[in-house]
């Protein structure tokens, strides 16, 4: 896969629930500017909300890097959520519906994956987790 | 910039809540607790949650809605969620949230009709 070109980038700190709301708003605004349909916009903002909250609750805080990316003739929104938390010991299980170690319903990761076009998770126990998602404009 | 409380209105024996701001998690938790108190205080039989102003419902807000419905049932009140935007409904289903036990209605009028039904039977 060719690395898409980044035409715009912003960084959001993720430490509190207010930060999650601010990051969500950032994604919403850029998705609207990019011209995503209402349904696609809602999906990507919801996915971002789940992953941003994960970084705060499970990762002990982190950051979201928001980008507008271009690959050949298509444009999309890419988000990278990084935290320095304990990492995910069982990635396969964490990707299953209903698996949760926290107080959630265990829908965050698998749910977020269903809401975007591309999803990649890299986690190292005791070093942290990085989740990258892309939603392409149709 | 952000409100720290969402107002709860009383209409007869129903409580009406209109969410018009992007809810951060603490705000959602505060609303859930305020509603429990208000149901007891006003002896309410129904709670109408208007979420037409919500741009997204993620798993946290979804859980808050389900918890509010469960909690109000224990307090002998019914909860109806109204005004969910179509894009939000599509996203919720894909996310995997089915909101069991939460009554849904298209708008406030139908939501109120739903709430008034059991009261009429009892009367």
Image (cartoon, rainbow, N blue to C red):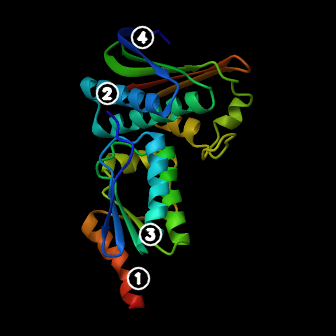
Q: Which quarter of the figure is the C terminus of chain A placed in? A: top left
Residue B49, position in %: x, y?
36, 59
How far apart marks 2 and 3 lie (CA) works out to: 43 Å
Of all chains, the one bearing label 4 is: A
Q: Earlier in the sequence, mark 4 or mark 2?
A: 4
Q: Is residue A105 above or below residue B105?
A: above
Q: Residue at x 27, y 23 (%)?
A: A34
- Going by the image, does A121 lie left or right of B80? right
Q: Chain of mark 1?
A: B
The answer to which quarter of the image holds residue B46 is bottom left
Rendered residue at 27%/65% (across/down): B108
Q: Residue at x 48, y 55 (%)?
A: B32
Q: CA distance from mark 1 to mark 2?
A: 43 Å
**Nearest to viewer (mark 2 / mark 3):** 3
How many angstroms separate mark 3 from mark 1 (CA)? Answer: 20 Å
Mark 3 — residue? B41
Give the residue number, with chain letter if any, for mark 1: B118
Labelled pair 4, 2 in contact (Cβ < 8 Å): no
Give coordinates of residue B68: x percent, y percent: 49, 60
Residue at 37%, 27% in the rendered image: A27
Residue bearing mark 2: A31
Write down the residue under mark 4.
Answer: A4
Residue count near mark 1 (Cα–Cα under 10 Å), binned few <14, some 14–19, many ≥20: few
What separation in Å lies between label 1 and label 4 (alpha carbons)?
57 Å
Crowding at dot 2, Cα within 10 Å, few <14 / some 14-19 / many 20+, comes out as many
Same chain check for tags 1 and 2: no
User: In the displayed structure, does residue A13 sit left or right of residue B107?
Assistant: right
């Amino acid at each position: 896969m060719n690395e898409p070109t980044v035409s715009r980038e912003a960084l959001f700190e993720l430490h509190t629930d207010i930060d999650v709301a601010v990051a969500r708003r950032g994604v919403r605004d850029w998705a609207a500017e990019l011209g995503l349909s209402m349904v696609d916009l809602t999906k990507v903002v919801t996915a971002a909300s789940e992953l941003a909250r994960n970084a705060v609750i499970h990762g002990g805080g982190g950051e979201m890097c928001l980008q507008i990316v271009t690959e050949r003739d298509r444009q999309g929104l890419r988000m990278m959520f990084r935290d320095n938390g304990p990492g995910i010991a069982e990635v396969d299980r964490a990707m299953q519906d209903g698996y949760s170690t926290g107080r959630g319903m265990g829908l965050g990761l698998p749910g977020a994956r269903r809401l975007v076009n591309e999803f990649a998770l890299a986690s190292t126990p005791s070093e942290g987790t990085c989740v990258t998602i892309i939603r392409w404009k149709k | 910039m952000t409100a720290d409380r969402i107002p709860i209105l009383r209409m007869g024996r129903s409580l009406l809540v209109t969410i018009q701001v992007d809810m951060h998690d603490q705000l959602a938790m505060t609303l859930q607790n305020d509603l429990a108190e208000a149901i007891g205080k006003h002896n309410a039989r129904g709670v109408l949650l208007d979420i037409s102003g919500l741009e997204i419902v993620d798993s946290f807000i979804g859980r808050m809605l389900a918890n509010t419905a469960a909690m109000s049932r224990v307090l002998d009140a019914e909860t109806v969620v109204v005004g969910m935007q179509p894009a939000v409904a599509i996203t919720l289903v894909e996310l995997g949230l089915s909101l069991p036990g939460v009554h849904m209605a298209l708008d406030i009028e139908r939501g109120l009709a739903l709430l008034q039904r059991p009261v009429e039977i009892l009367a």
